[in-house]
Image: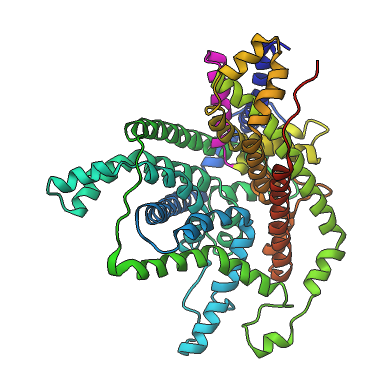
Amino acid sequence: MRTSLILTLLLAVVGLLTAVPALALILGSLSEGIGAFGPFTLGKYLQAYQDPYLLRVALNTATFVLGASSLATALGGILAFLAVRTDLPGKRLVLFLPWIPMMIPHVLFAAAWIMLLNPTSGLINLYLQALLGLEWGPFNIYSLGGMILLEALLDLPIAFAMLLPVFMALDPSLEEAGRVSGARPLQVLVRVVLPLLRPALLGAFFLATIRTLGAFAIPQVVGIPAEVPVLTTYIFRTISTGWNPDYGKASALGVVGLVLAMVLALLYRRATLKGERFATVTGKAYRPREIPLGPWRWPVALLVYGLLLVLVLLPLATMAYISLLPYVARPGPEAWAILTWANWRWLFQEPVVARALANTAVVAAVAASLGVVLSLLVAYFANRYRSLATTLLDLLTFVSFAWPGLIIGVGFMLFFVLTPLYGSLWALILAFVAAYLPYGVRPLGSALLQIHKELEDAARTSGASFTLTLRWILVPLLAPATMSAWALLASQFVRELSVAAVLARPGSEVLAVLLLGYAQDGMWGRVAVLGLAMVALSTALLLAVLRLGTRRGPVPPPQG
């Protein structure tokens, strides 16, 4: 098959996945009817933006997004700096642990902290009440501050992943030059290091801001009981309450959210492009200089490992404990006396859970496989061919990255409701692939840059077609990156909630949607066992891919 035809088909597929929800959102926001396109009017915009309640939503959203993204960037930057540029003890653990929260469903993370910091029954608050003789618990997770803290902890791995390689690439000779010139350490930090880090810090901040703008789990599970609405929960309430939800009004709100996300995405792209220019200046062969922490070495280590304990172990340990109780109880003799396997028996006996588990596994496996194939083709054309068409292709994949999941879900719902796909697993699969396409394209694109074009040129000179070259040359060489991309996509799909909350219907429920429902009903034992089952499913998918990678032998050459 000719490459021009493949590129045309690829543009059509990616264009449909990214343009359809945006077009459906725009048409839905301009439609007078509630469940269909047309007749067209601006009435939905007037109805949406004349609501006096929206001002409160906007202020809450701005505070939540800016607070969480700023805190996540700061914590991620500090952890990356300590892991690379200091003599912090046990640095390998610091390099590994921040990635684990990407495996934990956000609803489970929120539920764990509700169990710990609920003002009336949180385990930490109960201990402090008994210890200090307080009438009420001193901490309240049901607040805007609690939402910011939890979302920042969940976005921390994103900032950490972006800033870690930047600290590894910083040329220590620039800092040495500053010290030789008589500058104090603080002056070197302000005048030398921070200007070099500015593009990367801005890139991490904008990326965290885009992710937080589309956050749904924390605002829904923590923000709704706290009466702190944000944009995503406001849109979700519009389409999920009443007998006849107003999708047009939700679309009008979603269009503005989409525009905000696109502006942030363009700022992110600009910041990261600047970061690449800075990286070429310092791309030499050198080893980052370790800064001795001196007497602060162990106190800083205690703070860092305390943060990682809060980030990783405490939520999982809390959920494991709650899963064995019929109701929330403080650890002690009374709690030990009521330990039960009832929640786990329910998990294996409930038909709805079995169906949701099967749906989740199928959606994750199929969507990850389709996503990897599409990502490989997009990454190949975007990196190997320079033309207006490939630039457009790369831009379309970046556009989908900017969309908050709930908003892209509303767009796909408005489209799928006109097709037989509405309410089916294929609706979830296609929407998941569209929303997470960049998670496959970016890693595979980076791996492609390490493979010289002369291998493909040699294959074509020998008469191999594009498909044969792809199958026998590139795919074997890209196998590790392909498996990593599949594992990343599959783990994201297992815990994806924003898109599923809009598109899932009875019969197509996934575990994340069930988890949200039980959390809203306060059934924490069931939340715990479902969440731990999701973590186990993600781990099983990852281990299966790793095992496949270790068993993979050399690829036989084509015969004839």
Quadrant where the N terminus lies?
Answer: top right
Identify the coloring: rainbow
Residue depicted at 43% across the width and 53% down the height = 76
Is residue 389 within the magenta segment?
Answer: yes
Residue at x-position 54% and y-position 47%: 231
Instruction: Count numbered badges in the picture.
Output: 0
Q: Is residue 514 visible?
A: yes
Quadrant where the C terminus sits is top right
Q: Is residue 312 above or below residue 198?
A: below
Q: Position of residue 347 (x, y in %)?
A: 81, 65
108, above or below 20, in the image: below
* Side of 153 where 416 appears, left or right: right
Which residue is outermost to the left?
Answer: 182
Quarter of the image for residue 117 reads bottom right
Residue 224, magenta (yes or no) = no
| Image location of residue 284, percent across then percent down | 35, 35
Boundaries of the magenta span: 385-404
